[in-house]
Amino acid sequence: MNLPYFISKKISKAEKNSFSATINKIAIASIALGLATMLVSFLILGGFRKEVKDKIFAFSGHIQITKYSLDNTLQEEPISILNPAYQHPETYDFIDRVEVFSHKGGLLQTDEEVYGAFIKGVSRDADSIRFQANLEEGGFIRFPEKESSANNYSLDILISRKIANTLKLDTGDDVRMYFIDPPNIRVRKLHVRGIYNTGIEEFDEQVIIGDIGLIQRLNNWPDTLVGGFEVFLKDYQGMDKAAEQLQNELDYDLYVEKISDKYVQMFEWLELINNNVVIFLALILFVACFNIVSILLILIMERTQMIGILKALGARNKQIRRIFTYNGLILITKGMLIGNLIGIGFGALQYYFKIIPLDPENYYMEFVPIQWDFMVILLLNLLTFMIVALVLNIPTAIIMRINPIRAIRFD
């Protein structure tokens, strides 16, 4: 029989109204709340980072390939689609797909307002499914079916909710857009096919999604020329290595840019949030450890007479310390079970029912996001158990200094 474990189970089953029972409940609640807070924080942080990054990647891919240019205007230097990176992306095992794009600046005009923006042209190969998460109203661009016909491009566009509100436009409306290429000014009547909303100002204030064929015609480019390539990776975490390999293997006049560099402020902001959460969780762990040490000290003081009797009967300090270590581990286990139920339960409620809303103008999304990462959940549980279990050695060390005679007479 494991005598320390047997005694620890006995003393852990204190009477409901006793002082020990109250202390045990406080210890369990402290660990449960600490672990639940950590779980919820990481679930929300993971969801928040994923939502923001998905919005950025849906607009820009993971890596953009453009032609080097010293021109500071929005006019792009074209790239041929005969480039191997576009024609044979399968030669790179890290590439999921490659899409073409082009940009063209202009002025939107209605009867009451004028708004400066630029069209981002995409092809019929664009992943419309990925974009659906940002689409509030309407549908994606309808591309012409007959590719051999004259003026083979769509006049459908997608505008942001911010632009729609400013110009008082809705799906199904038509709007004129002026393209200024001195000395020429050209105008096109475009059809609002859909309205998107990302909550990210860099996109919502400037970007209109349209047909790349329209930009090719405005720039007098043949169908084989585009403004650049957007590379979507199988795993965006390998972005640095993929960009380096592409830069080394592509033509010298091509510029390979990671989206984390193009929108560096947003990615640094996400990293700053991550650091703040880590500091916050470290403080929670410290408080949980402090509480369990304090509570175990109280339990040891309450059991001083028992410790004296055990020592008088020949029990070694190591055996007595194990009694309270086991008692602490029982409290930790109960607290972690409750903490997991609270944390994961809250995450499930928010994930399925979206009970906590957010202001999209400040948080880029309409509700608190949740990302399920069971490896993170497991690691948090292991970290909590190991750290709190280690600090149990601090209060149990006081047992070595207890004198049996004084302990038996302790009142």
Image: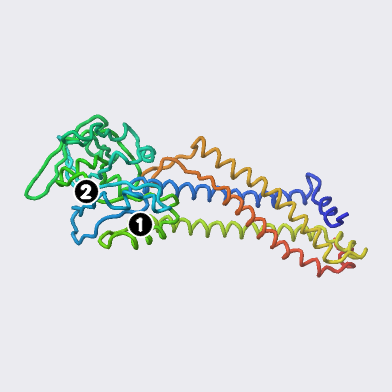
What is the secondary structure assignment of the residue under circle 2? strand
Query: Which residue was labeled with disc 1?
Result: 258
Which residue appears at 42% of the width and 53% of the height? 94
Mark 1 vs mark 2: in front: 2
Asked whether 1 or 312 is in front, the reply is 1
Q: Furthest residue to the right?
A: 313
User: Given the image, on which type of amino acid does mark 1 rest?
Assistant: Lys
First in sequence: mark 1 vs mark 2? 2
The alpha-carbon separation of the residues under discs 1 and 2 comes to 22 Å
Which residue appears at 63% of the width and 52% of the height? 381
Task: Name the disc covering residue 32, or none.
Answer: none
Asked whether 307 or 18 is in front, the reply is 307
Tag 2: Cα neighbours inside 10 Å, few (<14), some, or many (≥20)? some
How many numbered tags mark residues here? 2
Instruction: Report x, y in % for residue 299.
Output: 77, 57
Q: Is residue 154 above or below residue 21?
A: above
Q: Quadrant of the C terminus?
A: bottom right
Query: Which residue was labeled with disc 2?
Result: 225
